[in-house]
Image (cartoon, rainbow, N blue to C red):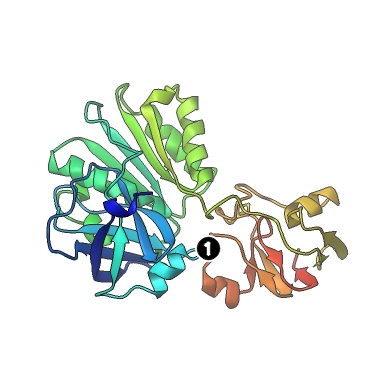
Amino acid sequence: MAGPQEQIEVIVRHIAVETQDIRSFVLERADRNLLPAFRPGAHIDVEPVPGLIRQYSLVGSPADRTQYMIGVKKEPRSRGGSSAMHGALQEGSLLKISPPKNNFALDDTCGRCLLLAGGIGVTPLLSMAQSLALRGEKFELHYFVRTSADLAFSMLLSAPQMKPHVFFHFGLVPPALNDFLQILLREAACDDQIYMCGPTAFMESIRVAAADEDWSQDRIFHEHFSAAPSPLPLEGDSFVLRLLASDLELVVPPDRSIVEVMRDAGIEIATNCEQGICGTCVARMVEGDPDHRDMYLTDEEHDNEQLFAPCVSRAKSRLLVLDL
Ligand code: FES
């Protein structure tokens, strides 16, 4: 992170609700000077409350140095970062940021850029798209989300210079996702490049499709966005899992997932990502106090419809009953 001498004090000029769980923040320098220039794909360290530092991609156009825009998704298992951004900041709040850094730079010399975004992974690709649009370059931004309600930054994406380049994909999951990617990458030219950001399983689907279509690795660039701040730990106490349809009770130990325990017992359950991202394994919960760890279901689905992703989620109670 930046040292104290490199920090910039900014004021939160505007906060917008982009989706149910994503907010955008417009930051301006507190001393009203211009902000440092940045190249597409850059991010900044943000300190929403003293001592808590998180990285967020710069979403706005690199041509505009009067303000930075970032997008923050509220994570259900937030370790403080997204909760602080959503809960502690208001318009007018002051906070510290670092100058821009870039581990995901756009190569100006390539052919057409294919920008492939999964969910909140669209954020670093937005500055790339705006820069390419401004320069009149050929590019495509493919934005994959669950439903139209999950579309963030629609104002930016519907700007006249962006519109012809932007393609939305709703609810596209494997195997349909893989089929689409294969066709997209098959039709690309040999100097096209891929810039991708999104959940691990999403990026893995792109890698597989690219390999199938003989893309070389040096034409593929990514920024990692994981569903959780770190690999989901399976800590916690053991609990009893009662499977209604199978008429079976199993003990889930602290170091095993529900899906693993079911498989050990010979009960097959359809899965795909096994990271709480795709929704393939989702089941109905009948009883228990759930510890939801997935990124697929909304808070409302967790609460009202009692849906549960057994590949990552666990129980806080001694007994969990699933309709499986
Ligand atoms: S297998 Fe993807 S959410 Fe469980």
- Compared across the picture, whether 288 is left or right of 190 comes to right
The kind of residue tagged 1 is Arg
> Can you name the residue that lies furthest to the front here?
5
Which residue is located at x 70 percent, y 56 percent?
234
**Residue 54, image quadrant:** bottom left
Screen quadrant of the C terminus: bottom right
Disc 1 packing (10 Å; few <14; some 14–19; many ≥20): few
Residue 191 appears in the figure = yes
> Above or below — where is 60 with respect to 206?
below
Residue 215 appears in the figure = no
Residue 300's x, y, as percent?
Answer: 53, 74
Residue 72's x, y, as percent?
Answer: 38, 61
- Compared across the picture, whether 107 is left or right of 312 comes to left
Residue 202's x, y, as percent?
Answer: 49, 44
Q: Cβ of disc 1 within 8 Å of ligand 1?
A: no
Which residue is located at x 60 percent, y 51 percent?
275
| Residue bearing the label numbered 1 | 79
> Above or below — where is 120 with respect to 87?
above
- Compared across the picture, whether 250 is left or right of 198 comes to right
Question: In this orientation, which residue lies closer to the viewer: 100 or 201?
Answer: 100
**Residue 181, image quadrant:** top left
Residue 47's x, y, as percent?
Answer: 37, 61
